[in-house]
Image (cartoon, helix red, strand yellow):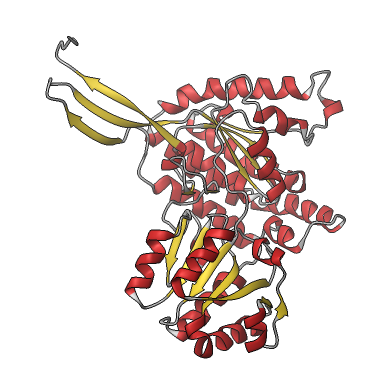
Amino acid sequence: MLTKTELNGNDVAALMADMGTRARAASGPLAIAGAERRNDALAAMADAILRRSGEILSANAIDMENAEETDITPAFRDRLKLDEDRIRAMADAIRAIADLPDPVGEIIAAWDRPNGLKIERVRTPLGVIGVIYESRPNVTADAGALCLKAGNAVILRGGSDSLNSSRAIHAALVDGLKAAGLPEDAIQLVPVTDRAAVGELLTGLGGTVDVIVPRGGKSLVARVQAEARVPVFAHLEGLCHVYVDKSADLAMACDVVVNSKMRRTGICGSAETLLVDRAGADTHLAPVLDALRDAGCEIRGDADVCRLWPGALAATPEDWTTEYLAPVISVALVDGISGAIAHIGEYSSNHTEAVIAEGADVVSRFFDEVDSAILLHNASTQFADGGEFGMGAEIGIATGKMHARGPVGVEQLTSFKYRVRGTGQTRP
């Protein structure tokens, strides 16, 4: 990996500008390459990842050893670590992406006008996508594959902590591009750790980058949202809530809440706040909190929760706005679905929320009135994932109001254009 002083006199700005130019040049042939060639490349990428698994694991071992010497949190170390199962999962995700319907050229809508014009709205690639991410080396594979499937070129900028792992994975992706005869510049990895490279990418590299997708911690996403001069698909943080209504099946509530919080505490879909219907506190609160405690979770409750379940620590105002990414959860009693909706509206980051209830009216109000990207009924918040949505994989979760909201998969990495066919019409 090059450092800034090893660029033979070229500075980071010149390096990044060149990458943008090469990505733009690759995007044209990539967009018209056809589904079969893109799928051939994806299949070859999956094969190459498995073939290079030893190299990838060796590179990851170096990253993990380096991580031990820093202040990286346990959650970040979990995201960084690779093993044989995670490598197979990367290859499987690429194959799943290849199996998805080809979005490029799909007719989204079609209609005829009274004057005889025939109009179609058709999916097209976005062009060049910049992806900035931290720790998770599997994002190298997911992002590269998703962008390729949608006909886009991509510039990947991984974190310095996953540097060696990302390089090894990227080499496998390039193998796949070569095997299918596609431009190698279609998937590029920034070869420097200098943070100035991020700043350059956020400028749009002279108009060569169309969209930025950040995937990482709050500070990274905040910087991207503040500095980017091109559109951004992102979420700042995952302040996810689970509401347990008095009508909830108790056994289901215990299982879903524990899974929402504890399956993997370091991901953005992990529940950070539990809301319990005050009318169901006598029957539902203690069993659910007992289950969380037995799973190793720390409970921070409001005054009512602490009174009813003495094992809870007193929650502070900051707890309701904290993304723990750790085995900690804040818990509050609320006045039914109205109280839950009000609490979520005040504190949520509009990422993912779940309701556990059997009452149809409760579920209907939750779905209608909670304005988050992903809403679940009687299911774990940890399903907030493009792979679990049948998208093969995702490049991230977006909480904005643009066309990409929720998991950003293949369809969200396309735009559209209009094709209008006439028979000589002129406008009076």
Q: Is residue 379 at all visible to an observer of this figure?
A: no
396 lies left or right of 118: right
**Viewer-closest of 373 and 166:** 373
Residue 19 placed where, x, y %? 65, 24
**Viewer-closest of 424 and 341:** 341
Q: Quadrant of the N terminus?
A: top right
125 lies left or right of 295: left
105 lies left or right of 337: left
Position of residue 214 relative to residue 26, above or below, is below
Q: At 69% from the left edge and 82% from the top edge, which residue is drawn?
A: 312
Q: At 67% from the left edge and 21% from the top edge, which residue is drawn?
A: 17
Q: At 61% from the left edge and 72% from the top edge, which residue is drawn?
A: 262
Residue 103 placed where, x, y %? 37, 38
Residue 281 placed where, x, y %? 53, 85
Q: Answer with the quarter of the image where residue 310 lies.
A: bottom right
Figure disc tally: 0
Q: Quadrant of the C terminus?
A: top left
Q: Is residue 39 at all visible to an observer of this figure?
A: yes
Q: At 33% from the left edge and 72% from the top edge, which residue is drawn?
A: 361
Position of residue 315 relative to residue 107, above or below, is below
Residue 354 placed where, x, y %? 48, 67
